[in-house]
Image (cartoon, rainbow, N blue to C red):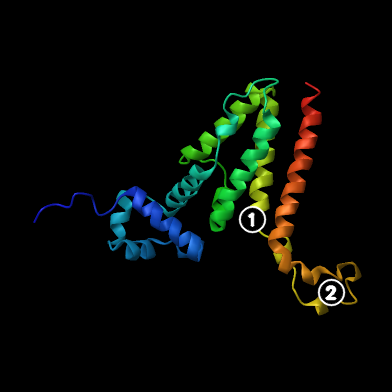
Amino acid sequence: MARPRQPLLSRERIIEVALGLLDTEGLEAVSTRRLAAELGVSGPSLYNHVATKDELLDAVADTVLTEVDLSMFAGLSPGSRPGWRDALYAWAHSYRAALAAHPNVVPVMARGPGRRRPNMLRVADAVFGGLVDAGWPRREATRVGALMRFFIIGSALASFAGGFPDDAAVYAGEYPHLDQAHLLADRQQEIDESAFETGLHALLDGLEGRFAKF
């Protein structure tokens, strides 16, 4: 029998299927047994491509980062237009959009760069390099990159508005200032997005004041 033109299994295919499971069923669904069943292979054969579940999740998270646009950091220089503020604004929205498309990967993403996440290091390199090219001192650029990452990932971990029960009786009497809180869940996306926008502008306003001191 002729050999198949393409191998039955590859690292890329494993990551693709794992991301699909993560998106549709959550972290708990990503197991060796489930992946093997989805791929139609034996469990041990997966270990020829990914050694551990943590390595697999690192690879899945790193794949999501390929969806983040970094082009806005190219060509930045002191006084350039658009400047570093516009670049951070556009990048923050692109990053948040990638996380919104894959919300179940956010807890994995929050762990940090890791040595097995080249795309995360590529993101860090682009942001840091762009800020330094735009005139930020290296130490400050590191802090700004960390601050932005904390804000973006934190905003994607959970919905603020979605955390409020939609039963008005929950708030009656004991929580007088929350007499409209039961309405928040129905406006979850609008509230969460506007909160992100408000926070992002506040951060960038503060960073502009800090940048003016250098």
Residue 209 to residue 171: above or below: above
Residue shown at the point (57%, 27%) measured from the top left = 74
Q: Are marks 1 and 2 in contact (CB under 8 Å)?
A: no
The residue most toward the front is 81
Q: Is residue 165 left or right of residue 106?
A: right
Residue 123 higher or lower than 157, as above or below: above
**Left or right of 151 on screen, residue 28:** left
Q: How many marks?
A: 2
Residue denoted by label 1: 157
Q: Name the N-terminal-most of marks 1 and 2.
A: 1
Give the distance between the C-alpha atoms of the residues marked 1 and 2, in whole angstroms.
25 Å
Question: Which residue sits at x=73%, y=43%?
Answer: 200
Apparent side of residue 213 relative to residue 125 in the rendered image (left or right): right
Q: Quadrant of residue 183?
A: bottom right
Q: Position of residue 166 (x, y in %)?
A: 75, 74
The quarter of the rendered structure image containing the N terminus is bottom left
Q: Could you say which is closer to the camera, residue 125 or residue 44?
A: 125
Q: Amino acid at mark 1?
A: Leu
Q: Amino acid at mark 2?
A: Tyr
Q: Which residue is mark 2?
A: 171
Indicate the position of residue 49 as horizontal and vertical percent values. Answer: 33, 48
Which residue lies at the image location 69% right of the left edge and 39% below the top edge?
Answer: 147
